Amino acid sequence: MDVMIIQADSLDGARSKIEAGCNKIASVLGPPSLDPQNRGFVPGAQAAFAIVIDGETLGFALKPELKTLFLNFATQCETVVCCRVSPAQKALVVKLVCDLVWYTLYHAQSPR
C-alpha cells in the first residue's frame, strides 16, 4: 500500500497536495470513472493507496472550493486517516461521505 501524507499550511498548498495525490493514483490506476456507480476504491485493484491528513489540512480540504476534489481523492483510497481533527471536522467528513453514498444510491435507482 502506498501511503500519501497530506500536510499543508494554506488552501493553495492543500489543493496542490490533493491534486498531486489524484495524479499519482491516476498514473497507476488510470483516471477515475465519472459514473457514480463505478467510482471510488476498487477491491482487488493492482495497487492500493492510503491518505494521512492532519486537522489543519483537513480544514482546507473541507472548504467548498476543495471538498469535491478531496472527496474524489479520498474515495479512490483504501484507507483515509485523519489525525488531530476536531469532532466537528470528523462530523463533516462523515457527512461528506454519507452525502456521496445517498447521491450514488439515488442515481443508481432512478430511471435513465
Image (cartoon, rainbow, N blue to C red):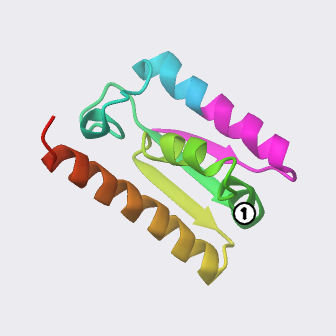
Amino acid bearing label 1: Gly
Residue positioned 42% across, 60% down in the render: 97
Q: Is residue 97 above or below residue 2?
A: below
Task: Name the image quarter holding residue 47.
Answer: top left
Q: In the image, which residues are magenta?
A: 1-21
Task: Name the image quarter holding residue 23.
Answer: top right
Q: Nearer the viewer, residue 2 or 73?
A: 73
Quarter of the image that includes the N terminus: top left
Name of the residue lying farthest toward the bottom: 87
* 65 sits left or right of 44 in the view: right
Residue 52: x and y, percent? 60, 53
Q: Tell me if residue 15 is in the magenta stretch.
A: yes
Name of the residue lying farthest toward the right: 9
Q: What crowding class fits label 1: few (fewer than 14 Cα within 10 Å), some (14-19), or many (20 or more)? A: some
Residue 102: x and y, percent? 30, 59
* 57 sits left or right of 46 in the view: right
- Label 1: state its secondary structure: helix
Q: Tell me if residue 11 is in the magenta stretch.
A: yes
Residue 85: x and y, percent? 66, 73
Q: Is residue 109 above or below residue 48?
A: below
Query: Which residue corresponds to mark 1?
Result: 59
Residue positioned 57% across, 31% down in the render: 22
* 100 sits left or right of 96 in the view: left
